[in-house]
Image (cartoon, coloured by chain):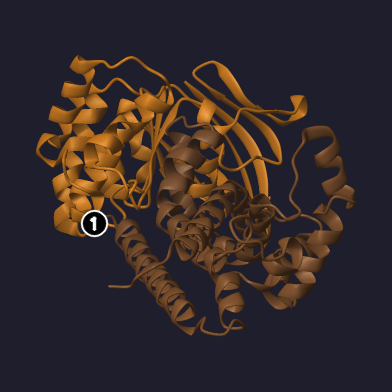
Amino acid sequence: MLDISPAEWTAILLSLRVAVIATLVATPFGIALAWLLARRDFWGKSFLDAVVHLPLVLPPVVTGYLLLLTFGRKGLVGGFLADYLGIVFSFRWTGAALACGVMAFPLLVRPMRLSIEAIDRRLEQAAETLGAAPWKVFFTVTLPLALPGVLAGMVLGFAKAIGEFGATITFVSNIPGETQTISSAIYSLIQTPDGDAAAGRLVVVSIVLAIGALIAAEWFARRATARLHGN
Amino acid sequence: MLRVDVEKKLGEFSLSASFTSEGRVIGLFGASGAGKSSLVNMIAGLLRPDRGTIVIDGETVDDTAAGLHVPTWRRRIGYVFQDARLFPHLSVAQNLDYGRRMNGLAPDHAQHKRIIDLLDIGALQDRRPGKLSGGERQRVALGRALLSRPRLLLLDEPLGALDEGRKLEILPYLMRLRDEANVPMVYVSHDVAELRQLATQIVMLKQGRVTSFGGVKVLT
């Protein structure tokens, strides 16, 4: 078996914590946005769509730098949150979670949006004729039918979040025990003499996590098809 | 009692219909494209008239002059679609119970049993809609609509998607419904034979206009 050192465990557990929190916090926003993009027409929709996809196409270091400017101690939003709510992002694991959440967001939203678009709207009409108010239709018909897509989006977002590197290291640096995730730990190790073995172990862990996520996403996608056909 | 007096433009097509009915089963008859479905969707509130009023059981649910439009979910109607539209993620039992839950009604076991027996769907309860035949699906859809305790039941060509054999299988259930369920119905069809057996009153629609209105004999 892999002989993982305590320092490496710290990085692995931090990565997991950062990715789990990023995914869980991003999910309700992701569902709301996916629904908005799938179902509503409004002014500025293509602009919103572009903004959401921006982290996917921008160099991660640019996204990280923009986060630093916005959510850093002296940033517009960061300064406000620190002064009035006591929430600090810069050089904290919460900042890593924020960076990972932003980077993962486009990947998380996409399957959710596709699964909402795939729902037969006539089923929602049927629910309405049975006396369900719009919010009840959403929670009893739309969301359950979109659930496999929602879970697939969460898995993809999680996989992206756990592997995020560029934006995270730019925004919150590479502090062991606070902001050093698996990716930044590997980056440090391969620049250290004799770090190859430790880097190799973390590489194996990354590969296992990534493949696990892909398998899970595939499984959810298959469930989605079965569900829509009523089996 | 149902009173309809509406106008609606849908692209090139214009619908203008007016009738009042006290009948137990109002047959809405016409060729495809005559505006039957649009009219039923307006009664259901899924489509909003450009002008006019709709009154169900004494309650005005649409009045364009007053800017009134009661949303579908508050109209207390039942709607059976041609394509059943059962919820694929719920079992038959959950589908049947959906309307009661959404309306926050107390369970009424006697009524539940009566409708399940009337439609012969007791044995299907644990199944998923995907595992039902077309006829079974339509019977469950009927039960689901009735169990929401509607004051008006709309049926839009409920036999339209079934072959002849299946139609004959469902027709007796519809006749029993008419005689025993005590819910007024609007029954849409382009099939004269079907309406002769079921309807007590006929509204004949041609290219968006009511051309005749009266007893079943107007069908000849």
Q: Position of residue B129 (x, y in %)?
A: 24, 50
| Disc 1: host chain | A
Q: Nearer the viewer, residue A64 or A141?
A: A64
Q: Nearer the viewer, residue A217 or B118?
A: A217
Disc 1 secondary structure class: loop
- Side (left or right) of B33 relative to A191: left
Q: Nearer the viewer, residue A39 or B111?
A: A39
The residue located at (19%, 15%) in the rendering is B110
Q: Residues within 10 Å of mark 1 (few under 14, many from 20)?
A: some
Say whether residue B213 is visible.
Answer: no
Q: Position of residue A153 (x, y in %)?
A: 50, 61
The residue located at (28%, 50%) in the rendering is B159
- Side (left or right) of A100 relative to B30: right
Q: Is residue B42 above or below residue B192?
A: above
Q: Is residue B127 above or below residue B43?
A: below
Q: Amino acid at mark 1?
A: Asn
| Residue picked out by circle 1 | A231
The quadrant the N terminus of chain A occupies is bottom left
Q: Position of residue B67 (x, y in %)?
A: 75, 28
The quadrant the C terminus of chain A occupies is bottom left
Which image quadrant is residue A226 in? bottom left
Which colour represents chain B? orange
Which image quadrant is residue B163 in? bottom left
Which colour represents chain A? brown
Q: Position of residue A73 (x, y in %)?
A: 85, 50
Say whether residue B80 is visible.
Answer: yes
- Side (left or right) of B21 relative to B187: right
- Side (left or right) of A175 relative to A143: right
